[in-house]
Structure formats: C-alpha cells, structure tokens
Image (cartoon, grey):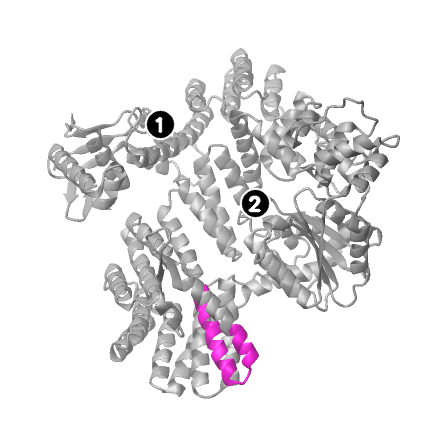
Amino acid sequence: MSRLTFHLLGAPRIELDDSPIEVDTRKAIALAIYLAMTGEAHSRERLAALFWPDADEARASAALRRTLSVLNKALGGEALKIDRELVSLERGAATWLDVDEFHRRLAESRTHGHPPHDSCLACLRPLGEATALYRDDFLSGFTLRDSPAFDDWQFFQSEGLRRELAEALERLAKCHNAAGEAEAAITQARRWLALDPMHEPAHRLLMSLYARAGQRAAALRQYQECVRILDEELGVPPLEETTRLYEAIKENRLTAETPSPKSQIPTSRRSSGVRSLTSNLPLVGRSAEVAALHNQYDSLGADGMLIVIEGEAGIGKTRLAEAFLERAHSLGATTLSARCYEGERNLAYGPFLEALQSALRQAATAARIETLESHWLSEAARLLPELADLRGDLPPTPPLDSPGAQSRFFESVTQILLALGNGLPAVVFLDDLHWMDEASLDLFAYLARRLRGHRLCLLATWRDEQVPAGHRLRQVLAESQRAGLAHLLSLSRLSQPAVAELLQLTMKSAPESRIVERLYHETEGLPLFLVEYLAALGGGEPEADWPLPEGVRGLLHSRLAMIDEAGKQLLGAAAVIGRSFDFDTLQAASGRSDEETVAGLEALIARGLVHEVGGGDGALTYDFGHDKLRALVYDETSLARRRLLHRRVAEALTSRARAQTPPGPLAGQAALHYRLGGRNAEAAHYYKLAGDHARRLYANAEALSHFRSALALGHPDTTALHQAIGDLQTLAGEYSAALTSYQTAAALGSLEALAELEHKLGNVYQRRGDGELAERHFEAALAAFGIDGFQGSRARVLADWSLTAHHRGQTERALDLARQALTLAEAGGDQRALAQAHNILGILASSQEDLPTAQLHLEHSLALAETLGDTGAQAAALNNLALAFGAGEQVATAITLTERALKLCASQGDRHREAALHNNLADLLHTAGQTEAAMDHLKQAVALFAEIGVEAGVGANTSEWQPEIWKLTEW
C-alpha cells in the first residue's frame, strides 16, 4: 500500500510515496487535512456546509463531489473512503501525520513516573524530537478566505499546538540545564520566549540560565530587554518576582534565598480612619425608612423576617442597609454581608459563599458554627471546604445523588446561619439580588420559606427596574408577605429640601439657594450622583463658576485625574479583577511591589475611590465606590494591558484553585479571566472544571453555561461536553436541543462512546412519546455494544426498550424484553441494571393487575436503587410503587411514596418527571378528598407540562406541539 504523509506543522505539504500530491484547489488540500486530523467519518452535508458556506445546498454538494473526485485521484484511489452519505480518510499504518508524531513524543515524555508538567533526563530525547518536528505553526500561511468555519478550526488547532510547544520547550530547557548542557538549555529557552516575548516566566528562565552559565552580563541584559518590551507594549513594569531575580543576579547571590518583602495590608487604622464620603454622609430624607427598619427588627419575636429595600440604581439602597447593619451591630447582633455581581451570574452560590467565609473569619461566630452537629458541617463543606478545619470528626459527605441531597445541602447552610444568633436575631444582608445566580436564588427561596420559628433577619436590596412583575424574586417576596414574614421598603429620589439639608451638612456655611437648585437640577435627587458631586466639591464653599461635569462620566474623569500613575495602574488592575478584590490578587496583577501597593491603596481609600470591605482580621477586601467608576476605568484601559492583567489575575486564581479538591468556584472566575486574557485553551479547561463543580451542586443552569463556554473555546473533549450538555437539556425538558447535542456527540465521538449515546437518544425519544424512533436507537445501541460483554449496559437498553414497547401497547414484546434485561443483569451482576429490570417488570405486572407481583418487583428495585444512591432510579421505583398501591386503594401509602419521588425529581432538576409526579399526586389527593391540595399540584403540573410540551419549530415564530409529553405517568 502507498505511504501517505501529512506535514502540517508549517506550510502544509501532503506526500504520496514521498512525492507531493497534485490538486488544483486549496479546498482539496484543506479537505484532506481536515479528514486526516479529525480521523472520523463526516457526512457530506457537514463537509459541504463547512467548505462552501455561501453556496446553496445543490452547488455546495456539486463542489464537494468534484473536490472529492480530484482528491481521490491525487491520493491514488486508496486513502479516501466515500459512500453516499459519509466521507472519511483511512488512518492505517501507511498514513503518517507530523502532528500525531508530535503528540506521541510528548506523551512518551509523560510516562516516566513524574507529574505531567515536570521532566527528567529521560525526557530529553522525546521532548527534543517533538520540538524538532514543530517547523512552524499549524498550516502556517494557509487559509481559506471563503470558509470562516475552517479558518476558526485551524486557528484553535494552531493555538492548542503552540501552547503544547511552549510547555515542551520550557521542560526541554530545564532538562538540558539539569544535564549540565547550558547552551542547549539557553537555545530552547530563547525559542520558548520567541513564542511570546511578553511572557515573563520565559524571561526569568533565560536570566537564570545565563547567570548559572557564568554569563552574568547576558542575564542582566535579558532583564533590561524584559523591561523594555513590557514598557513599550503594555506600559507596565515587570512582576516583583522578575525584579527580585534581577537583584539577586546583580548582587551575585542567585543561589541564595530572595524572600519577598513582607506584605503590608492597609487597614482602617493605618489609613488614619479615612473612609469614603459615601459612608460618612448622614442619611437625610430617609427618617421614615430608618424608623421602619428599626421597628421591623425590634418587633421580631419567635419568627424571622425578610426585609427588601428596592429602588433604581444609585437611589441609596446599600447606604440605608449599611446604616441598619451598623445599628444592629451596635446592639450586639451578628451581621453578615455579601454582594451579587453582574459578571458572576454563572457563579453558583457566590454570595452565600462570601457571607459564610466572613462568618468563619470572626472568632465568635466561628465558635458558634463549630457547635453544630457534624453532619450539617459535613454537608455544608461541599460549598465551604474550610468548615472541615473547624472539627476533625466530620463524617464523609453523602453522595450528591442520594435521596434529598439538595434539601440537606440547603438545610445545612440554613443551620449555619441560624447558629449565628446570640440572643438577638442575626442579620444576613444580600446586596443587589437582581444579579443573583440561579443556584443562589434556589437557596434564598429556601431560606425565606423557613423563617417561621427561626429568629433570622434576611435583608436584601434589588433594583426595581430589573425585577419586573413575575420575576422569581417577586414571587418569593409575595409568598413571604402572605405569610406575614416580609416587609418591602421602596425608595424614591430625594426632594429638593433634602438635597439642601445634605449640602448644608457637608459645607462650612449655609449654601446659597442657587447652589441647591443647581445641584438638585443636575442630579434630580439621585443620591449616588449627589454623593459624587459633593465629593468633587470637597465639602467647602464652591466658587461662583465652579465647574460641574455634564454627566457621571465627566465627574469620574475629574476624580480619576487626581491620582498618580501608580494609583491608575492599581485601579486598572482592580477593574480587571471585576469584583471586590483582595490585596494579594491586586498586587500580583498590578506588578507593583508590596510597599507600592500599600501606598497606592491608602491614597485611593483617602480619595474615596475604593473602600474597605470587612473587619480588621487580616482578610480585608476592597471595592470601588460604585460600578460606574469600575466600568470607566476598565473601558479606558488599553486592550493589550487588559489582556495582560486578565492573565495575571487568572494565574493568581488558578494557583488557589489547584489547592482545592475539586477546584470549586474559583475555576469559573479563572476561566473568565483566561478568556478575556486571550488564553482560550486555559479558559476552556477551567470552564469545564467550573461546569463539573456547578453540576455537583445541582446548579444545572450554571453548569450548562460553563460547558457551552468550554465548548466554544475549543476544549478538546468535545464529545464529553456535548454529552454533558445533552444530559442537562434532557433534565430541563429541552428535548430538541438534547437530541442535537447527543447527535453531535455521536458524530464527534469514538465507537466506544456511540453505544451509550444511542441509548440516550432513545431515552429522549421515549420521553417525547416517539416510540418508533426510540426503538431504532435502542436497537442501534445494542448493536454498538455487541453480543459479548457489556451485559449491564445491554440490560439497561433492553429495560428501556421494554418500557417503550409497553407504552406502544406491545405487551408480549415488552415482557420478553424485560425478561431478557433481567437475565443479562443477573448474569453480569450489575445492580443498576437489576434495579431497572425489576422496575419495568413491576410496571408490566401492574398493567396486568397483578399487584402483589408488581409490588414485589418494585420494592426490590427501590432497595437496589437506595443501596446504589441512584436518585433517578429511586424516583422511578417510588412513583411506580405508588401507582401500584393506588390501584390497590391504599391511597395514603401511595401519597407518601409519590411525595418522596417528587422531592427526588425536584432535587435532580428533572422537570418532565416532576410534572408527571405533580399530576399523579393531584389524582391521589383528589381521591383522598383533599381537593385544594390536589388543585395546587395540578396547576404546577400543567405549568410544567406546558413549558416542556411546546418546542421551538423551524421558523422564527413557529412552534411544535408535543401532546405525548402530557401522557407521562410511569417510567
């Protein structure tokens, strides 16, 4: 057979028996490369759309046929496999790709028993061979101007390979250095630096290599080169770590330890008690609101209270809440505060994590938390791993898919907050709820519903224009108001007399009426604007022609002009962090020394541009005076500098994330910064980790967002991501989208993954009530699993197929499939498959009115599911057992079982089955004479069924009605 070689690292070259192939179009070369690199069979429709996106279907298909013909002839008619639907390129022993060889060499270097990113002397050969293969970037100089999708694919391939080369060159340089081969180490380090001249770790490695090789002058020149490049390109100094290395080389003490100066973090005492003007201004025009807040808190008895302060942006909601917190704190109450941020809507439980972390930093509250029962602490440690440090006797955390796991998790957080009370009700303040993530909303609603009998004050603010009627927050508030456990405080703008009073209190003398009128006219009584104007005036008597900015942007520019260059760099770094920031992350991102960062922060605090958040316990964080200031600073930071700062922030966050197992909420933040810093591969990696974390905490919406981001940024495991997205879409009842995701995963995945995906496709069609299509996919799944092995997997497919046959009225066939499933499950010893087989046998026995046999099978299924901790299987067995007991007129038992199943489905987020259980429960309650409760569940069922039963159609304003969705009762 002819030998086919692909040289793709550099300008592309394809050779057949050592001679370049001859084709007449670049599309033919691109098509061969795409087929070789993917190693998969692609449909003709997909290839036509990829390479000829602007042509209609007929023209694109014709162009593809011609290109395939030309390419097949050039390849000697051997390599291409073409049929009526699929096209692929045979990847046998006679086919060689330099990209594959590059990856094989890198993989070999990771088989020596050390961590993947480390190296040893045995790595020299494979790393050297790998880097030698890399002549230039992937397909260097090659492009298809009329195929943006191919160019995008090429770009992501190239970026991924460049990152792999950079890591390989770093490891290779260190290998040569360890082997005493100084010049070879320097050569590889210079090649690494050439990939990104602004990459400071490469500069540092070169400096170190030069110095250890006795080339001290070259090492010092390398530092100067680093300073020059960073200054010219980004306008920033090197990181402190780079400067310390330079000083060590200059003073001939490279081998000596060069400790970092001890961090000095500014505190309220060190900044002479300076606070922002916003905090010092008195509350004017708010006496009624202050009195209402005090009365609500003072009247709390055995029950808690939800207090909501609403109003437009800048109306003074936070300032009023802070004044209330100060008063509660002065009375001796425990207070916790946290904010929600616009850029963190996909960060699951972010505000609650912030509040609990602040509680742990306070010795008194930490001591009270420590007294909680160990199982509550263990459960809450999912969100806050630091809880494990309080006690050494915490039991293992129950599996996430165990019965009622989400309820236990929510209750554990509730128990911690309730433990904070010290005779007086604790106050938990959550600011800007309109930006709260979906998972936190679930937990917030849970807390609000459990204030009866618990002395806890939940204080919240939101912007009324961003929380319209029908918003979930409105529903939570209305429910609490009906229970008499909520109070709503709506803020309006300040009147002109209130503005006059405020102005008089801030000036040395009574202001002239013209000044009051002008200030009121410019601000329209909006407290945020008033605060900023008063800050610009400085509290003194303004001159007659005092310049007033035309808007907030002009005002913020005037305040920013008063800070020096170091302060501007600190503000720029803080703006990139994107939320309240801590000292260490700010210092790392800005590149300033500890002393410069301390001095700069003190100046910014004194100017009121940032303020401290938290107490004096050494864990201070800082925040901008308001979001508009942060947005302005961010917008006016150059793109190049922004990207550098985002990378530095990401690296600081990932260093913390690596210390967590699993990485947890920091992964989502790191992913965002890597993406904004132009490091898409790293961003994709951390988005995947963030999605996994959110999924473990039942934050399905956040998990879906993270997985989609990982996919869009080129995460290599596309099959797993599409499958995970399909799983979440299935739970949400988005069946058309789930089918697309699974089909995409099947097209991209390996043969080993195909069987499971075919099974999942069949299950989606089964949920939609399309039995014929479901059976086709179940049949394909069995064929993919084969006749040998995979007994448990095959048993589960047969059980689902049996259910489909049952729904189609094919009783005998259903029984035969169910018995086959049971036989295979028993032979394979697969407990999960056994649970499913007994479940379907129970359903079939119930349909034949053999209730004793049905109950026997279903109770066996339930016992197995509980042992496995399989939430879905438990819910199914409970529901079907309830239907059997209901048929036997044991309605009370059936109601109890259905309620248990409903809780499990709700915790899992399976909306379709949740709707079915509401409907089943409504029927049972009606039979029991509980008409009102039955109607309540029926309404919930109808609402859910209606959402799932209508799926978007092809047209922009069309939809497809799915009547079979409503027929679900058993599964």
Q: Is tag 1's residue or tag 2's residue first in the polypeptide sequence?
A: 1
Which residue occupies the foreground of this view, 306 or 502?
502
- Mark 1 residue type: Thr
Please tell me whether residue 30 belongs to the stretch shown in magenta.
no
The residues tagged by marks 1 and 2 sit, at their Cα atoms, a distance apart of 40 Å
Disc tally is: 2
- Mark 2 residue type: Glu
Q: Residue at x 36, y 87 (%)?
A: 850
> Quadrant of residue 630 in the image?
top right
Question: Would you call the spot at circle 1 few (<14 residues within 10 Å), some (14-19), or many (20 or more)?
Answer: many
Query: Which stretch appears magenta?
Result: 911-937
Q: Which residue is mark 2?
A: 344
Q: Which residue is mark 1?
A: 131
Q: Quadrant of the N terminus?
A: top left
**Farthest right residue in view:** 509
Check residue 230 in the rendering and tell me which mark sits there, or answer none: none
Residue 484 seen by the camera? yes
Q: Residue at x 35, y 62 (%)?
A: 764
Q: Nearer the viewer, mark 1 or mark 2?
A: 2
Q: In the rendering, at what x and y percent does residue 180 appear?
A: 45, 22
Q: In the rendering, at what x and y percent does residue 85 appear?
A: 18, 49
Q: Main secondary structure of the magenta part?
A: helix
Which residue occupies the foreground of this view, 626 or 367?
626
Q: Quadrant of the C terminus?
A: bottom left
Q: In the rendering, at what x and y percent does residue 681 appear?
A: 43, 37
Please tell me whether residue 924 belongs to the stretch shown in magenta.
yes
